[in-house]
Image (spheres, rainbow, N blue to C red):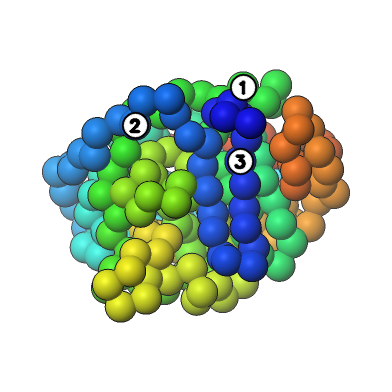
Amino acid sequence: MSSPRYLCIALLLGLITIPGHATSPGVVAATSEAASPRVIFETSAGHFEAELFQEEAPVTVDNFLDYVDAGFFDGLIFHRVIGNFMIQTGGYTADMRLRQPKANIINESVGGPSNRRGTLAMARQDYPHSANAQFFINVRDNERLDAQRSRPGYAVFGRVVSGMDVVDAISVVPTGVRDRMGDVPLQDVVIHQVRRADPG
């Protein structure tokens, strides 16, 4: 039961979790860059574009862009899809192998944007500062995932600005159990590429 492949979402508690690691990597910060960068997701279901909240979540955005620039997300699948809730990616290849992330980052949810429909937020374990590469897109307003006063929630770092119909289509694909993980699309929804949008 300690395998890093197992991913659990406790819907009643509003938890979006990521696999554990035998050794917890250190928490790192990142340097900020130009405000409001955008990225384009090219997937087997179509493409969509997201604006990143550089000002509100600078560490999270810089971490995400590091993964984008490294091509980390290319070839991964949406491995957890729950209709009327969220779609999650950033971890697994089509053969259900976990792609090893880099160090964890600090949680920027306190005082940050709300988990509203169309927003991107970081998945994590129970420990608030355990997010690294996995993230999800809210397909409805999920304010229960927000920070509660000083208690961290799930850090929002961007929002879909075009192609939300593609996200909605992914959210209703048939799912089942694969490799002892639930809510996995029965037909792979693959991220072909995530890239920065051309400025202007």
Left or right: 172, with 116 as reference point = right
Image point (52%, 36%), residue name = 19
The secondary element bearing badge 1 is classed as loop
Identified by mark 1, the residue type is Arg
Q: Residues within 10 Å of mark 3 (few under 14, many from 20)?
A: some
The reply to whether residue 44 is visible in this rendering is: no
Q: Earlier in the sequence, mark 1 or mark 2?
A: 2
Residue 70 bears which disc, if any?
none
Image point (62%, 47%), residue name = 8
Left or right: 200, with 46 as reference point = left
Name above or below for residue 99 compared with residue 32.
Answer: above
- Which quadrant, please, contains the N terminus? top right
Q: Earlier in the sequence, mark 3 or mark 1?
A: 3
Q: Residues within 10 Å of mark 1 (few under 14, many from 20)?
A: few
The secondary element bearing badge 3 is classed as loop
> Marks 2 and 3: in contact by CB < 8 Å?
no
Q: Nearer the viewer, mark 3 or mark 1?
A: 3
Name above or below for residue 17 compared with residue 73.
Answer: below
What percent of the width, then of the height, locates residue 149?
A: 30, 78
Q: Nearer the viewer, mark 1 or mark 2?
A: 2
Residue tagged by mark 1?
97
Residue tagged by mark 2?
24
What percent of the width, then of the height, locates residue 69?
A: 35, 31
What percent of the width, then of the height, locates residue 180?
A: 76, 33
Identified by mark 3, the residue type is Leu
Residue tagged by mark 3?
7
Name above or below for residue 77 compared with residue 157.
Answer: above
Image point (34%, 64%), residue name = 152
The picture quadrant where one finds residue 54 is: bottom left
- Which quadrant, please, contains the C terminus? bottom left
| Front one among 157 and 26 | 26
Instruction: Give the Cα separation between the discs numbered 3 and 2.
Output: 16 Å
